[in-house]
Image: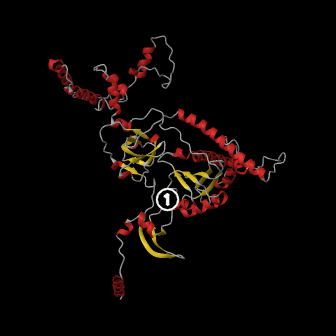
Amino acid sequence: MRQRRWVELLNDYDCVIKYHPGKANVVADALSRKERVKPLRFRAMGMTVQTSLHDNIMQAQQEVIERENLKKELDCVDELRKLIFDEAHKTKYSVHPGADKMYQDLHAFYWWPGMKKDIAEYVGRCLTCAKVKAEHQKPSGLLEQPKIPLWKWEQIAMDFVTKVPRTSSGHDTIWVIIDRLTKSAHFLPMRETYSMDKLAKLYINEIVVRHGVPLSIISDRDSRFTSRFWQSLQKSMGTQLNLSTAYHPQTDGQSERSIQTLEDMLRTCVLDFGGNWDSHLPLIEFSYNNSYHSSIGCAPFEALYGRKCLSPICWSEVGDNRITGPKLIQETTDKIAQIQQRIQATRSRQKSYADKRCKLLEFQVGDRVMLKVSPWKGVVRFAKKGKLTPRYVGPFEIIERIGPVAYRLRLPDELSGVHDVFHVSNLKKCLADETLIIPVEEIQLDENLRFVEEPLEIMDRKVKKLRRSRIPIVKVRWNSKRGPEFTWEREDHMRNKYPQLFDEEVVPNNESQISGRNFSNKGRL
């Protein structure tokens, strides 16, 4: 009936009806649409505004006008400014604005000499803003580069590529070891569950046997590299371990950059040739070492052995390439000097580029700084706050300067599992006057962050007989995750380093031993 009524009404007009889809009719009158939702009902929110601030301002102005206060400093003025700042910055209706926003909000109602400077200092001393506000400045700390090595495979860098798809051979990790001079590398497939014994054998068979014992190793703070077994092994061979600072992977930039190239080559081989990635790893290592590197101006193979590698693309050699005797030694020495000059030129260029994007920042021993926690993804969790976690924690006191861009902090006992040396890019000067009580009970550290092996108890003891001496040794049980659980150590060394193991130890006399034996025999009967 309704449609018939509308048809009869439209017959009186000379018009043409055209169909227009509803989706295309974007300019339809909203009033002609049928309401599908109920109208929202609003409740007026009551808000009580304190009028004490206005009364305080009027009272302060009245006191200034009085004749006896014209030449006196009124403490109430400073207190009044602080009250204004607190109302405009820390209340629920302002929620910690920045210095510029706070000044624009206040200068229309208040004014005094140096007002903008006072607001900037007040906001800079706000501890809550220091914890949660993001920095929109250049990263701190200029680029610091290690010294150029003097010879091949004397100074190396290493890192692990983990979480790789497990192959049929059980390999799920790649151990990347790189020479910092020639840029030659070894990619060793392994399992993530390898013990430190297997890693030590792999290291000796693949690196020490081929290139000799290195003088220094740069690596991150992986639990394998910080383990007592690995440190003892390198100390016995005379190798210095240079570990990175906490949460600063740029320290081992050589390994990180090589790993990026390695992963790209692995993806390419798996995509083009298929199969397991560990079957392509030897040829990937060959291709990597036989490719041109811009930093040294040649291929790592040529820098290492003094001549280019024969590859399938080299069908024939032109000329006589045989060099023997003193000429070979002289040419190798000249190439090393040339490589060092090229590396120095490349480093100077890289440093000039990097320092343009960074700023110089230095601290003094005793300064209080805030510590950035945003890089600790997956390591530090603040209860259930998730994305709302603060960007900084602290303040902490600087107790030592380690090099030009690293500092040692005094951390609380609750953060004892975190390495206490940090790069300057993870620090920010704390200007707040009040002392922060750090809610460390909300901070949860990952157990695999930094594992330190400690002795648990002494299981046995004996005397090692040498030709002219007797050395007492003890069998120690460790809380080891990767290395051996039991080891024999010198008793005097253990007493100096872990005296608590010997505090409760009581040496039984002969009578107690006899009585113990009699008691045990009686028990057996």
Q: Position of residue 437 (x, y in %)?
A: 30, 44
In this view, which residue lies farthest toward the front? 468
- Residue 295: in sight, yes or no? no
Please name the amino acid that badge 1 sits on.
Ser
Q: Position of residue 379 (x, y in %)?
A: 44, 49
Residue that carries the numbered disc 1 in the rendered image: 227
Could you tell me which secondary element the residue under label 1 belongs to? loop
Residue 148 occupies quadrant: top right
Q: Nearer the viewer, residue 496 or 407?
A: 496
Q: Nearer the viewer, residue 337 or 25?
A: 337
Using the image, determine if residue 60 lies above or below residue 96. above
Residue 71 occupies quadrant: top left
Q: Is residue 44 left or right of residue 259?
A: left
* Quadrant, the C terminus: bottom left
Structural crowding at the residue carrying mark 1, measured as other residues with C-alpha within 10 Å and reported as few (<14), some (14–19) or many (≥20): many
Q: Position of residue 7 (x, y in %)?
A: 44, 18
Using the image, determine if residue 227 lies above or below residue 459. above
Residue at (59% x, 44% y) in the render: 257
Q: Is residue 253 left or right of residue 118?
A: right
Q: How is the image coloured?
A: secondary structure
Q: Nearer the viewer, residue 210 or 187?
A: 210
In this view, which residue lies farthest toward the right? 319
Residue at (47% x, 63% y) in the render: 480
